[in-house]
Amino acid sequence: MTLTDMLAPDITPLLPTEAVVQARGRALAAELGGRSSTRAPARPRRAPLVRTAAALGAVGAIAGLGALELFDGSVTSQAQAFPVFATHHVTPQEVSDSILGSFLKSEGGVPGNPPNPSAPDGPYWAEAASHAYAFSTYWGTAYTLKKYDPAIGYTVCSIYPDDQTPIVPWHGGWVGGCRTGKTLAEAASGWETIPDPHGIEFVQLVPEGTTAQVRVGNEPATAVPIHDGVLSIRVTSPATLTVHAGASTETHQLQPGVPMQPGGKAPSTQRRGAGHR
Amino acid sequence: MDSPHTDRALWRLVIAGDTEAFGRLYERHAVGVEAFCLRRTADPVAAEEATSEVFLELWRRRQRLTVPGDSARPLLLGIALNVLRHRWRTERRHRATMRRLHETFEDRGAAEEPAAETLQALTRARSIIERLPRREAETLMLIAWGELSYEETASVLGIPVGTVRSRLARARERLIAPGTKPFDLVGPTQEL
C-alpha cells in the first residue's frame, strides 16, 4: 500500500448520494429564498462558533439564525445570574501565560500569528479575551469567555486544562468548546468532562442558587461545593451527579475513563422539568 | 465575462442574494466539502455538521468573500479548515463515536463491515497526518484530501507556492522516515 492510498482511502460509502445532496440544495435555496425577500442586505459581521446551530444541519442552522436575529437581551441582568461572570477579569499577562493563551494562538487571536484569511477571527478572540474569567478545576485554572452579538445572541467558550490530549501536537494540553444561544443561560449551560487514566472530571458553569449532589457507588449522596458559580468535581469510581438549577434537575452518570458526549448532549444525561437548558 | 457555468459566475449571483445560485453551489460542492471534513474528523456525523457549518459561514460572509478562480472549492476548503480547527472536541467525540459504531457493527454483523473498515482506514489516515506539525498537516490535507493544486493551496493558506512545496517536502520526509522522532509511525501505520 502506498502512502497516498494510506492517506486517502475510498470513502464513497460514507458520503451522501447525489439525490440527497440535490434535495438538501433545493431545501437550502427554498429556505434562504423565504428569508431573503424580507431581509435587508447582509451587513458584514463576525461569525463566531455556532456549534449548536451547526448541529441542526445547513437548512435548520440558517433558519435558526433568523430566529436569533430577533433577540435583544439584557447583558447585565443575565450576567448577574451566572456568578462566574461577576468575578474579576483575568489580566493580559495571565492570558499570555495560560492555556487561554494557547487557545488564542491556535485561533489566530495573538499579534504576530495572522488568522486564516478565510476566517479572520483573530480580532474577535482578542476582544473576547479581554473579558475572560478564570476559575479553578481539578486539573488547574480554566477560563471562560463571554460574547454578546445582537445578531447571533450569546457565545460562551470555556477552556479547560487537559493534559490527556497530547496526541494532537497543537492541542497544547487544553480542551474546550463554545455554545451559542439566544440567552446567556442557553450559551453557558454546557458542561464538559475531562477523562484521565484514573478518573473523570465534570465541570459546568451554573447559575445562582444551583445545588448539586454526588453519589459514588452505594455511598450516601453528598453535596458538591460550588464556588463562584462553577461546579467542578472529579471522581475515580462510577458516580451519579445530580444538579438542581431552578426548576430543572439533571442527572449525569460519571464513568471514570469514559468520555461523555460534550456540550450537554450525553445520552446518559436525564432532564426533567423546565429550567436553564 | 465569466461563463454562466463557473462558480465565479454563480458567486456573483449569490452576493446579489440569489438563493438558487447558492443552492446550486451547495449541490456542486457539498460532497467534496463533506469528504474533506470526513477525512479530517473520521466521524461521519461530525463531518456532516462541519459541512453545514461551512456553508452557513459562506452564506453569512458572502459580502466579504471572493472566488478568485473559476472554482469555489479552495474558498470552501479554507473555511472548512477553519471550522475544523475550532472543533477541538472532535478527538474525544471521535473516540466515543468509534466506540458506538464498533458496538453497532458488532450487533449488525458482517453486512456493515465495509463501512467499519472504511472508518478504520480513515482513522489510520487521520492519525498519520496528525503526527505532523500543524502547518505541514494542513498543507498536506488540502492537497491530498482537498485535491487542490499547489497554487490553490497557497491562496487558501495565504502563503507562497514555494512554501507549499517546502512544507510538503518536509511532511513527506517525516512520514517516510520511520527513524525520525517524534513522528515515528507506530502501530497500524508501520506497514508504511
Image (cartoon, coloured by chain):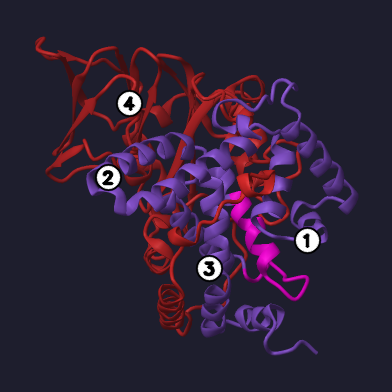
Chain colours: A red, B purple
Tags 3 and 1 both on a single chain: yes
Assign a secondary structure to mark 3.
helix
Where residue A277 appears, as percent x and y from the top left, is 26, 44
Tags 2 and 3 both on a single chain: yes
Assign a secondary structure to mark 4.
loop
The residue pinned by badge 2 equals B104
Assign a secondary structure to mark 1.
loop
Chain letter of the residue beneath label 3 in the structure image: B
Residue A213 in view here: yes
Find the distance from the CA under tag 1 to the CA under tag 2. Answer: 38 Å
Q: Nearer the viewer, residue B1 or A36?
A: B1
Q: Is residue A223 above or below residue A181?
A: above
**Residue A258's mark?**
4
Chain letter of the residue beneath label 1 in the structure image: B
Q: Residue at x 30, y 45 (%)?
A: B105
Q: Residue at x 76, y 38 (%)?
A: B171
The residue pinned by badge 1 equals B149
Tags 4 and 3 both on a single chain: no
**Callouts 4 and 1 close, C-beta under 8 Å:** no
- Which badge, 2 or 3, is on the more N-terminal residue? 3
Assign a secondary structure to mark 2.
helix
The residue pinned by badge 3 equals B30
State the image quarter where residue B66 is shown: bottom right
Residue B72 counted in the magenta span = yes
The segment highlighted magenta reads: B62-82
- Which badge, 3 or 1, is on the more N-terminal residue? 3
- At label 4, counting other C-alpha atoms closer than 10 Å, the crowd grade (few under 14, some 14-19, many 20 or more) is some
Find the distance from the CA under tag 2 to the CA under tag 3. Answer: 27 Å
Find the distance from the CA under tag 3 to the CA under tag 1. Answer: 19 Å
**Amino acid type for the residue under numbered disc 4:** Val
Tags 2 and 4 both on a single chain: no
**Amino acid type for the residue under numbered disc 3:** Ala
